Amino acid sequence: MGFITTLHPCLMQKYVDSVAEKWSMSRLASTGHRFTNFPHALYATDVTFQQTNAPSGSYADKKLYFSGKHHLYEHKVEVSVLPCEFDLGCSAYAKGSVADKTIFDDNLEFHCDQLKKRPDEVDMADSDDEASREPKQWAVMADKGYQGIQRQVRAILPDKKQSGGILTWDQSRRNDRIAADHSIVENFFGRMKTLWAPVGYCYHWNRKRYDLLFKTCLSLTNVHVRFNPLRKEDGEVYAQYVNRLESIGRKLRKKKKSADRAYRTKRKARLALVLAAEGALSQNARGNSETEADSDRDDESF
């Protein structure tokens, strides 16, 4: 671990921080690496999660790490990926109960700094409805869990179906186009989870070292992507990873429900025995009191 601690700053500076400095929108445009459907988006953002062991402490402490969506104790990290397939930064890990939007808000300074247009990009072609509202920013692409960030930064978000309503054909088509561009993040997650066990399996180590290990794996994934570009199969691997954790969550939830049901059955049986015993005692006590009363009456008659 000491070796990783020493190497980590160098890896981050050379393979992550330098990416943000090098790959500006003007460079992406000149090299033909902009997003196909939304060229005014600088990068795509999403949250990846990883199962962890239940923390020691009170129920309130444990509850913070528990994800109601996956029914697992989790760590969550927000990652941003450029259309050239490199990551340009990530957030500190958050507990499993924290919403994606909240993680984005906590990392807002990073996004505002990265999305800001550079002086040589102000006059670049920028066709988007939000361009007039945020003329000095490029857009960030995210999924439905990020609803609300459009009030803070220039964002490309899928349309969300209203309760009891349906999406129009144009809205569905737009959502498909967003998903096609946004899939680059899932591809990156798939590559990262495949390469590095510390971020691909249940995390049991010291939580204080999680950010160090995650960011180190992130920087090394950038190195791997440089020589082996992301592929569709990486996204499929990540989908399998998500499905596996969801399956684990369902099994644990089913097991807990079964245990709760067994507990309630046993408790009901215990209560029935207690009530029966109390009934028998009260009946015996009533019988004894009646016997004593009869005896007293007999004594008085004499």
Image: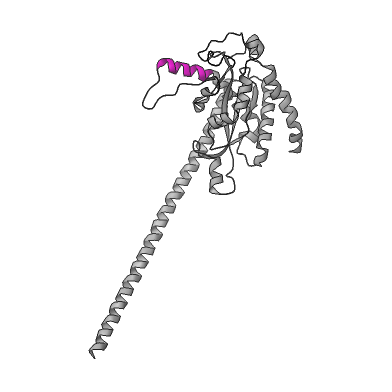
The C terminus: image quadrant: bottom left
> Is 196 positioned to the left or the right of 291 in the image?
right
Which residue is located at x 59 percent, y 27 percent? 108
Residue 195 lies in quadrant: top right
The secondary structure that dominates the magenta segment is helix
The N terminus: image quadrant: top right
Q: Position of residue 230 (x, y in %)?
A: 62, 20
> Is 98 positioned to the left or the right of 1 in the image?
left
Which residue is located at x 47 percent, y 46 percent? 256
Which residue is located at x 50 percent, y 42 percent? 252
Q: Which region shows up in magenta?
A: 167-180
Whether 222 is drawn above or below 136: the answer is below
Residue 237 lies in quadrant: top right
On whether residue 177 falls in the magenta region, the answer is yes
Q: Position of residue 99 (x, y in %)?
A: 53, 33
Q: Residue furthest left?
A: 301
On whether residue 129 falls in the magenta region, the answer is no
Whether 13 is drawn above or below 121: the answer is below
Whether 53 is drawn above or below 41: the answer is below
Q: Position of residue 107 (x, y in %)?
A: 60, 29
> Is 140 positioned to the left or the right of 7 in the image?
left
Q: Position of residue 139 (x, y in %)?
A: 56, 18
Whether 198 is drawn above or below 146: the answer is below
Q: Residue furthest bottom?
A: 302
* Marker count (numbered): 0
114 or 193, which is in the foreground?
Answer: 114
289 or 177, which is in the foreground?
Answer: 289
Say if residue 218 shows up in the picture: yes
Which residue is located at x 75 percent, y 31 percent? 7
